[in-house]
Image (cartoon, grey):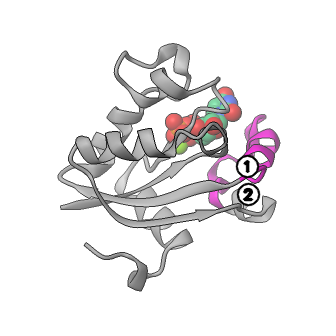
């Protein structure tokens, strides 16, 4: 069993899409082994997305990510990292395949409703960025 880090981003929380998204996550065989709702600070968002600090969208992205509450999740299943990326769909909803969450819910390339770790090393950074071991219960 593999674990990945996921988020329901502020645009989706604001539009009351949490229940629909969590239902889909469970229906696709993921176990929600940790869950918390927070509004991250700008500094927390900058640390989380540090890999993107040189990108032109970094300031807008971290402002948006700290603009309202988000849901933080640890998801567990076989091939969780790849399967969660597949269920989310492409970063730009214009490129997202039918049936993916971003195709269904995302507003644009920035406000794309969901986050997921893109590799084991990323999950190993992102999970403990927000969750302690005692909060993750398989
Ligand atoms: N993003 C953006 N403009 C871009 C690319 C990305 O605003 O041109 C935002 C978007 O919210 C995306 C996040 O930055 O989800 C992180 O980008 P990444 O390339 O890591 O995409 P992801 O892994 O989330 O699919
Ligand atoms: Mg990414």
Which residue is at a point 80% across and 59% down the rendered structure image?
42
Which residue is at a point 68% across and 55% down the rendered structure image?
69
What x and y, as percent, mark residue 19?
45, 45
Looking at the image, residue 97 sits to the left or right of residue 12; the answer is left
* CB within 8 Å, label 2 to label 1: yes
- Residue picked out by circle 1: 53
Give the residues in magenta.
Answer: 48-68
What x and y, as percent, mark residue 121?
41, 60
Which label sits in the foreground, 2 or 1?
A: 2
- Residue picked out by circle 2: 46
Specify few, some or many for label 2: CA neighbours under 10 Å numbering under 14, 14-19, or 20 or more. Answer: many
Give the SS element for disc 2: helix
Q: Is residue 47 above or below residue 109?
A: below
User: Which of the two residues, 116 or 56, is positioned nearer the viewer here?
Assistant: 116
As drawn, which residue projects farthest toward the bottom?
A: 134
User: Magenta includes 52?
Assistant: yes
User: Magenta includes 5?
Assistant: no
What x and y, as percent, mark residue 115?
51, 45
Point out the image quarter for the N terminus: bottom left
Which residue is at a point 57% across and 37% down the rendered structure image?
113
């Amino acid at each position: 069993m593999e674990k990945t880090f996921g988020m329901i981003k502020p645009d989706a929380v604001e539009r009351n899409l949490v229940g629909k998204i969590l239902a889909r996550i469970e229906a696709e065989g993921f176990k929600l082994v940790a869950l918390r709702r927070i509004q991250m600070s700008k500094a927390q968002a900058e640390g989380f997305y540090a890999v993107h600090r040189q990108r032109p969208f970094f300031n807008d992205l971290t402002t948006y990510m700290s603009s309202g509450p988000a849901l933080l999740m640890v998801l567990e299943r076989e091939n969780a990292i790849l399967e969660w990326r597949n269920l989310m769909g492409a970063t730009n909803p214009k490129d997202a395949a039918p049936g993916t969450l971003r195709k269904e819910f995302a507003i644009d390339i920035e406000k794309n409703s969901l986050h997921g770790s893109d590799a084991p090393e990323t999950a190993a950074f992102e999970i403990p960025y927000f969750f302690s071991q005692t909060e993750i219960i398989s």
